[in-house]
């Protein structure tokens, strides 16, 4: 059971984020968060944590674009300065690398967003734990 005390960090964000990056349940770390490529499961198959409250929306796509862009641009500039490849070679190499890296990162960013929301009790995560007097 989790605490309602705001000074007790019973849902450490760091651990939840690592579990989210691994596409695992932020609560137990064992069950898979995603069903298929990007669909978030309603509940964890292992610990039955309710994951239906998540509202990742466009956040994972924005994070993926941000990360891939910051990785690819310096690599493209360095490759161009060092080797002066033909434009078609640059497009073929870095276009493929961008697509592959984006496809690899997108589900992990979705897991990360769900984990952050769970850890901070956003959008209804943790409402069932509140005990009313």
Image (tube, rainbow, N blue to C red):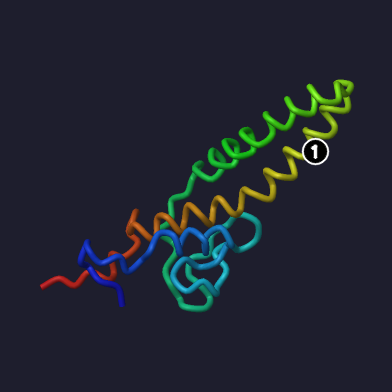
Q: Is residue 93 left or right of residue 132?
A: right
Q: Residue 127 placed where, x, y %? A: 28, 64
Q: Nearer the viewer, residue 100 or 67?
A: 67
Q: Residue 71 placed where, x, y %? A: 65, 37
The number of numbered discs placed on residues in the rendered structure image is 1
Q: Could you tell me which residue is drawn at 54 percent across and 41 percent down?
A: 63
Q: Quadrant of the N terminus?
A: bottom left
**Residue topped by disc 1:** 96
Q: Is residue 126 left or right of residue 114?
A: left
Quadrant position of residue 2: bottom left
Q: Could you tell me which residue is drawn at 42 percent across and 68 percent down?
A: 50
Question: Image height check: is 50 above or below 40?
Answer: below
Q: Could you tell me which residue is drawn at 80 percent across and 38 percent down?
A: 96
Q: Quadrant of the C terminus?
A: bottom left
Question: Image height check: is 32 above or below 98?
Answer: below
Q: Could you tell me which residue is drawn at 32 percent across and 69 percent down?
A: 10
Q: Residue 27 placed where, x, y %? A: 44, 70
Query: Looking at this rendering, what residue extends furthest in the front direction?
Result: 82
Quadrant position of residue 51: bottom left
Q: Residue 81 placed where, x, y %? A: 79, 22
Quadrant position of residue 93: top right
- Which secondary structure lies at badge 1? helix
Question: Image height check: is 40 above or below 98?
Answer: below
Q: Nearer the viewer, residue 22 or 79?
A: 79
Rate crowding at label 1 as few (under 14), some (14 to 19) or many (20 or more) other CA atoms within 10 Å: few
């Amino acid at each position: 059971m989790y605490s309602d005390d705001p000074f007790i960090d019973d849902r450490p964000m760091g651990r939840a984020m690592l579990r989210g990056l691994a596409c695992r349940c932020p609560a137990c770390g064992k069950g898979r968060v995603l069903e298929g490529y990007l669909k978030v499961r309603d509940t964890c198959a292992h610990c039955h944590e309710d994951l239906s409250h998540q509202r990742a929306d466009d956040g994972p796509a924005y994070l993926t674009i941000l990360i891939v862009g910051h990785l690819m641009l310096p690599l493209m500039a360095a490759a161009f300065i060092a080797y002066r490849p033909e434009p078609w070679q640059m497009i073929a190499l870095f276009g493929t690398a961008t697509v592959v890296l984006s496809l690899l990162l997108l589900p992990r960013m979705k897991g990360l967003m769900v984990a952050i929301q769970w850890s901070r009790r956003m959008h209804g995560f943790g409402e069932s734990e509140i005990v009313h007097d």
